[in-house]
Structure formats: C-alpha cells, structure tokens
C-alpha cells in the first residue's frame, strides 16, 4: 500500500510504533517496553541502547505485514540528555530522562547569574528547572568529569535514534525549546544562557524544521530494522508537540486534555503563553509559527491507583471508578486534594501533598473513591481556568489518554470543567499521528498539517449536567480554599489526613 509512513513514539515506558496511511488511517501498531533505572533518589535513567532495541523490534514486527513505507518520523520524550563522544557513541550506558531531578543545585547556581524569571520568560521552560538538559550538562561536568571530557554532543531521545538511523546529528525547534537554552521568540539557542552555564554552543545539535528530511536510513540501520536503505527520515518533534499536533492542535485556540498517570491542559497558540505565577510550560510547535503551552496536575491516575491500593486492594481501577460513579456528586462532603507527588505552582508548588478531608463515619468506600475522581477534576479545572485567562481557547475540549476511557469519570470531568468534552477515534494514538503528520507534510504527501484533523471521528461526547453545577460550585470552592491552606501551612503540606 503506497503512502504509508512509520511513526515512532519514544515514551517513558516504551516505544509505540504505528503505520499510518496517507488517508489518515492507522494500519497497525505495537508497543515495545523498556526499563527505567533508579540509581539514587531523584535519578531516573534509561539506556539509549534499549531505545534502539525497542525501535528495531517494533519496526520489524510492524513491517512483517509487508506494508511499504515512504518515510520515518519520531516523537520523543522531552528533556533528554544523551552525551555522545566524537564517534557518536554514548559516553555512559545510562542517561537521565525527563523526570531526572539531579541538577537542582546547578540550576540554582545559574540563577545567581541570570535571574530565574528572566530564564523562564525567555525559554518558556516551566517544569522544575533542574529537569532541563542545560542543567544536567552542568551536573555531568561537575560530577562525571571523565565522561564529560569525552562528550562532544548533548542530544535528546528521538535525535539519538535519528542519529542511529541516519548517522546525522540534528534536532528540531520543538525539541530544542526544551533544552533550557532556547529563546522561543528568536527560535535559536541563547548565547547568554549558554555563556552563563559555561557551555560551548557546539555541544548542542543543529536545529532543523520538524518536517525536514535529515537523511536516509543507513545500510547498517536498514539491516537492523528491515527497511530499505535510504528510506527518508524526518527530523520529527518532541512528544508534547506531536501529541498536540495529533490532538487537533493545528491552529490557534485548539485545546485538549490528556488524562493519564498525570494530566494536563494544552493550548495551541501563535505566541508563547507565559506567566511567572502559574508557570505554563511551553514548547515550540512542530507547525512553524505556533507554540504549545500547558499546565499539569502531576498525580491524577497515579493518585487514583494509590487510593485503590489503600481502600480497595486487588480490584481493577476501572471497577473502583464504576463504584465511585454510584456515589452522588460532591461525594457527600468528602474531598481529596490529589497532589500526592507534589504540586504545580497553582497547586502550592513541589512541597504540596495530598489531603483527604471532610470525612464522616457515614461515608462509604464509593464516596471516598468519588472524592478522588472529583479531586483530579477540580485540579484540572484550575489548570483550565488559568489557561483560559492567559490565552484564547476553543469552547470544546478534546480528551485523550487512558484516563478518558470511563464514561462515568468523563461525565465528572464535563460537569466540573463546565465545558463539552469530545473523545475521538484517535485517543491514545495522538503522538504517533502527530509524528505521521510531520512525515506526510515533509514528504509532500499532505499539503498541510490540517489533514491531521481528519482521523478525529467523534466517539463520545459529554455535556455538563446543569443539575450538578451548584453542587460542584460549592465543592470546588472548598477545594480551592484547601489548596490555599495547603500552600500556606507546613502542617498540611506534610500530607495530613483530616476527618
């Protein structure tokens, strides 16, 4: 079948590979997992060799069906920091991934030379600063000097795989915008930030457009993957950008909610959405001239899993969610703040922790479970309100991810968020659809990115229930008051459970 492309999404847990036709249909997909290693507190590392093994295994599995491909494009987990030597080989077996927090002290050191707010407003890097590659590079220089002496290039996840595919070292604007040293408006690395960090600009890969063909698959890589030598490889994009592109983020104002272990609200805009108070994190879009900006709640699905283990061990999460949906809106006064792994700036910051409150002897398990579901929805409502105050957002919200699979929970989201929600046939394929769209546009098979909207055939739609609105307004006011109290009270910030 002519016109198919191979889209690879390097996530935190594994490589998702998909074949997409030029008509916008997913022909086949598979997931190959890889491990994350934790060598010390705050360290989260993976083997680049495992990424490559997953890519080769997934590709061989998909192509066994005999579908010819026109090109390959990758979506890659952000904030990667793979050090390569002069021969293009990793200087260390393990590399820190996006969530590795070892470089906090290095960020603090740089902010004695460049004000932290100046850095944020220039880069849009709204995650905790120590997660960004700029600071991880400073950490390596200080703590791994022998490896650092051998390092010639600092590269990200999908760019490492692209290098294995083509022998070419390059990145794209979306991935570079998560480096900690990229000026969003100038679309280039920032020499002042690099100088303040004491880093040579030559350490960072050249920046290309996401749709640029950076090279063809080498003979060695072709033999490993089972693809023809010379198959075009596109620069691709960071996973945040690919997910937005594959979630109808093809024009300003489009907004979607990704519901999973963590959840976030993302808006596509023609300017970076920046705010020193709420700290949206911003990436350059794969679509030139556009940006994606988002606010998160870190523990959504993970908070519900924790709650399940606590009050209903052994039953599937979906069963507990169904039980929770039998409780009345407002959970009969029970309330949960789901910041079990810390909060965003609008949730009290990293030191914030979860709280169960309003508990009564009359409460049943389903009430407590519903309080958890509603708490996640209340947290996401705060993100949605903040984004709407900062940027133009469409009235309708697209939802995707594993957390959007339960109708009852989706209705809670619609009622609490106060907007219509749509789930489409794309759902969890958004990142690979985004990567495929990059390939189709870059190869000239699509005239523009708007063709990526076509696969979004509506599957379910949820309208806010007017009858639930007064109950949720009162519960949300209590939630907001509790968040404010949490932010100002060390006692609450330690995660005390209140009856």
Image: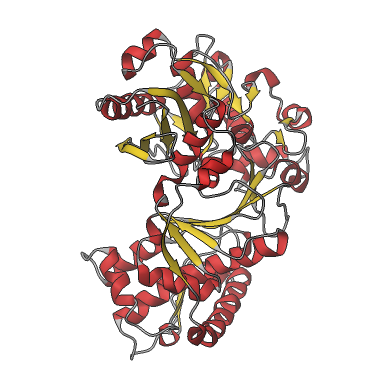
Toward the bottom, the furthest residue is 362
Q: Quadrant of the N terminus?
A: top left
* Residue at (49% x, 47% y) in the render: 454
Q: Is residue 38 visible?
A: yes
Q: How many marks?
A: 0
Left or right, 14 with reference to 205: left
Say above or below: 206 vs 54: above
Viewer can see residue 125? no
Q: State the residue in front, 152 or 229.
A: 229
The quarter of the rendered structure image containing the C terminus is: bottom left
Q: How far across and how far down the image is residue 62, in percent?
A: 29, 30
- Image vertical order of residue 436 relative to residue 301, above or below: above
Left or right relative to 97: residue 105? right
For the point 67% across and 51% down, which residue is it? 252
Q: x, y (%) of residue 478? A: 56, 82
Q: Where residue 283 sits in the image (x, y, percent)? A: 63, 42
Query: Along the line of sight, which residue is nearer the eye, 1 or 33?
Result: 1
Please provide percent x and percent y for residue 112.
76, 41
Q: Residue lying farthest left?
A: 314
Q: From the viewer's perspective, is 2 left or right of 159? A: left
Horizontal side of 290 relative to 225 (left or right) equals: right
Q: Nearer the viewer, residue 35 or 272?
A: 272
Identify the colour scheme used.
secondary structure
Is 375 in front, or is 36? 375
Q: Is residue 146 above or below residue 117?
A: above
């Amino acid at each position: 079948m002519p016109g198919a492309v191979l889209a690879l999404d390097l996530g935190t847990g594994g490589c998702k590979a998909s074949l997409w036709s030029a008509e916008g249909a997913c022909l086949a997909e598979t997931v190959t997992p890889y491990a994350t290693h934790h060598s010390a507190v705050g360290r989260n590392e993976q083997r680049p060799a495992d990424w490559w093994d997953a890519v080769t295994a997934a590709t061989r599995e998909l192509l066994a069906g005999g579908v010819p491909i026109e090109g390959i494009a990758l979506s890659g987990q952000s904030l990667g920091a793979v050090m390569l030597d002069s021969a293009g080989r990793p200087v260390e077996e393990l590399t820190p991934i996006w969530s590795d927090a070892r470089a906090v002290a290095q960020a603090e050191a740089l902010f004695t030379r460049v004000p932290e707010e100046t850095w944020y407003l220039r880069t849009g890097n709204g995650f905790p600063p120590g997660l960004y590659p700029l600071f991880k590079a400073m950490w390596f220089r200080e703590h791994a000097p022998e490896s650092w002496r051998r390092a010639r290039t600092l590269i990200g996840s999908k760019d490492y795989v692209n290098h294995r595919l083509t022998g070419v070292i390059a990145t794209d604007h979306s991935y570079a915008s998560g480096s900690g040293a990229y000026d969003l408006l100038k679309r280039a690395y920032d020499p002042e930030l690099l100088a303040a960090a004491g880093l040579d600009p030559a350490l960072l890969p050249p920046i290309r457009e996401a749709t640029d063909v950076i090279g063809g698959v080498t003979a060695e890589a072709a033999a490993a993957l089972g693809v023809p030598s010379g198959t075009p490889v596109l620069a691709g994009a960071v996973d945040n950008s690919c997910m937005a592109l594959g979630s109808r983020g093809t024009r300003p104002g489009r907004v979607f909610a990704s519901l999973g272990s963590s959840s976030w609200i993302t808006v596509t805009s023609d300017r970076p959405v920046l705010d020193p108070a709420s700290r949206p994190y911003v990436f350059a879009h794969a679509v030139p001239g556009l940006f994606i900006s988002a606010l998160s709640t870190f523990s959504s699905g993970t908070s519900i899993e924790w709650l399940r283990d606590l009050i209903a061990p052994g039953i599937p999460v979906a069963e507990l969610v169904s039980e929770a949906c039998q409780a009345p809106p407002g959970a009969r006064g029970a309330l949960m703040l789901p910041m079990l792994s810390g909060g965003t700036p609008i949730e009290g910051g990293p030191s914030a922790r979860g709280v169960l409150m309003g508990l009564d002897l009359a409460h049943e398990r389903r009430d407590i479970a519903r309080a958890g579901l509603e708490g996640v929805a209340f947290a996401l409502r705060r993100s949605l309100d903040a984004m709407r105050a900062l940027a133009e957002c469409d009235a309708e919200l697209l939802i995707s991810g594993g957390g959007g699979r339960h109708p009852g929970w989706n209705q809670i989201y619609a009622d609490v968020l106060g907007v219509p929600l749509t789930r489409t046939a794309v759902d969890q394929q958004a990142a690979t659809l985004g990567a495929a769209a990059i390939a189709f546009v870059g190869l000239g098979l699509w005239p523009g990115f708007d063709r990526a909207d076509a696969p979004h055939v509506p599957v379910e739609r949820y309208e806010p229930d007017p009858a639930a609105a007064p109950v949720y307004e009162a519960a949300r006011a209590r939630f907001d008051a509790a968040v404010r109290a949490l932010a100002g009270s060390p006692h609450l910030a330690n995660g005390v459970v209140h009856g």
